[in-house]
């Protein structure tokens, strides 16, 4: 095994900088490592053999625990919201897709549109495991029914890029739907494998508040009073907006918890450290990114159940062309939204972007290692923050970085 490569991977993991995306498994020789749940309940690369990993240059360049970099930007860049071509709110025109999705079902509707118009051969995205209702797996969807099976949020670890080598080897065109860090990594990897741009014409994402450990799901089930062995199915959200966390037992008993309680009081207390210093919760590297277009109440999002509504940002000309085509075919319905209104719907993401530079510096001071973030508007964003809040956030991160590694 190349000591440089193994040392790099171990350093990223040991310093809590791994996102669990799985790209390293697709780069090193097949079988050399695999993604597996660690003791804290996060997916991490686990070395399997003493095979020579080769040079570490590719992993060093693409791993989101090492760097996140826009490179040359071709569209207008907003310090908080990243590259923007157009901003809209909308929903899937198909009522079933709208109901099953986590917000307005736009991502699922776009996936169905791409398949039904033969713009891709399949869609690669995360769905609940066929074997375990609590685990995630990569699903290759080729039909509307496939897409619907994967609709809804999956607030648990997933590593969609660990199968990238096999996906590219198929030689088929596909759309990729992943977390913001997955998309950023995929964009970077395109510099090393020309097949990425050739075979993946559409990259779609969603705004992300962080990846909870599987232990968060276990705690959620405990609060619902459901044993893991009793489960027949489990959904974090969907079937409404924002939808309920829902556990169904083998005896068809249904246990539910509202979104504000499940995410706000349980799951978000189990986030991995890397998510707390993330510069891109808004999917800046995607062609199209969607999010909950929350209605406001007293300056905060209102989680009252209602018909789903998606915030829809097209970030590239390719993404904007897709949105316009989907609108024309009536796969989705949407209307233009002023950029300043995004903050009313996603205040968490505003605060996160303003604070991340301080959190990054605090991580460097505490651990002597942190990812390199370039061309992400972090200085501009931090200058709009309240200085006291910025310093308090940085100090809090320093203390966590000293005592918390995932």
Image (cartoon, grey):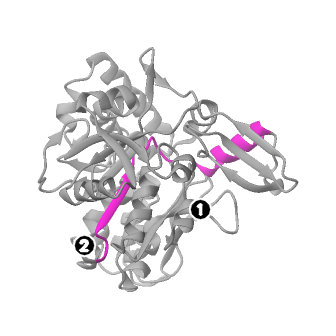
Residue that sits furthest to the top in the current view? 298
Q: Do we see residue 18 in this rendering?
A: no
- Foreground mark, 2 or 1? 1
- Most foreground residue, 94 or 314: 94
Give x and y (percent) for residue 300.
Answer: 45, 21
> Height in image: 54 above or below 83?
below
**Magenta stretch containing residue 201, yes or no?**
yes
Say whether residue 396 is visible.
yes
Query: Is 379 positioned to the left or the right of 126 in the image?
Result: left
> Relative to residue 296, is residue 173 drawn left or right?
left
Residue at label 1?
Answer: 149
Q: Which mark is residue 353?
A: none
Identify residue for label 2. 197
In whole angstroms, how far apart are the C-alphas of marks 2 and 1? 27 Å
Is residue 373 covered in magenta?
no
Using a 10 Å C-alpha cutoff, classify the residue at mark 1 as few (fewer than 14 neighbours), some (14 to 19) or many (20 or more): few
Numbered circles on residues, count: 2
Q: Looking at the image, is 98 positioned above or below residue 60?
A: above
Which of the 4 image quarters holds residue 323?
bottom left
The picture quadrant where one finds residue 244 is: top right
Identify the secondary structure beneath mark 2.
helix
Q: What residue is shown at x 23% (from left), y 78% (from top)?
A: 194
């Amino acid at each position: 095994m190349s000591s440089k490569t193994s040392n790099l991977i171990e350093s990223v993991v040991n310093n809590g900088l791994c996102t669990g995306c799985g790209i390293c498994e697709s780069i090193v020789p097949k079988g050399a490592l695999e993604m597996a749940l660690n003791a804290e309940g996060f997916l991490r690369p686990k070395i399997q053999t003493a095979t020579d990993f080769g040079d570490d240059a590719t992993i060093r360049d693409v791993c989101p625990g090492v760097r996140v970099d826009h490179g040359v930007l071709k569209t207008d860049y907003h310090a908080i919201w990243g590259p923007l071509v157009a901003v809209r709110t909308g929903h899937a025109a198909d009522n079933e897709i709208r109901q099953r999705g986590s917000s307005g079902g736009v991502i699922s509707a776009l996936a169905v549109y791409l398949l039904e118009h033969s713009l891709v051969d399949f869609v690669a995205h995360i769905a609940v495991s066929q074997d375990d209702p609590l685990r995630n797996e990569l699903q290759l969807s080729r039909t509307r029914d496939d897409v619907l099976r994967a609709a809804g949020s999956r607030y648990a670890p997933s590593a969609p890029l660990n199968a990238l080598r096999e996906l590219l080897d198929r030689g088929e065109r596909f759309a990729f739907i992943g977390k913001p860090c997955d998309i950023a990594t995929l964009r970077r990897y395109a510099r090393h494998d020309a097949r990425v741009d050739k075979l993946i014409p559409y990259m779609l994402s969603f705004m992300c508040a962080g990846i909870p450990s599987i232990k968060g799901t276990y705690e959620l089930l405990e609060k619902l009073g459901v044993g893991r062995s009793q489960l027949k199915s489990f959904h974090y959200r969907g079937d409404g907006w924002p939808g309920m966390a829902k556990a169904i037992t083998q005896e068809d008993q249904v246990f539910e918890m509202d979104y504000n309680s499940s995410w706000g009081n349980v799951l978000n207390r189990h986030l991995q450290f890397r998510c707390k210093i993330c510069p891109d919760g808004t999917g800046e590297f995607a062609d199209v990114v969607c999010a909950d277009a929350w209605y406001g109440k007293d300056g905060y999002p209102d989680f009252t159940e209602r018909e789903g509504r998606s915030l829809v940002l097209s970030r590239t000309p390719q993404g904007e062309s897709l949105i316009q085509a989907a609108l024309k075919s009536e796969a989705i319905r949407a209307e233009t939204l002023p950029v300043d209104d995004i903050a009313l719907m996603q205040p968490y993401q505003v605060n996160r972007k303003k604070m991340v530079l301080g959190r990054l510096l605090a991580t460097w001071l505490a651990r002597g290692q942190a990812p390199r973030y370039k061309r992400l508007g972090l200085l501009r964003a931090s200058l709009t923050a309240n200085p006291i809040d910025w310093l308090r956030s940085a100090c809090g991160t320093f203390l966590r970085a000293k005592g918390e590694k995932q």
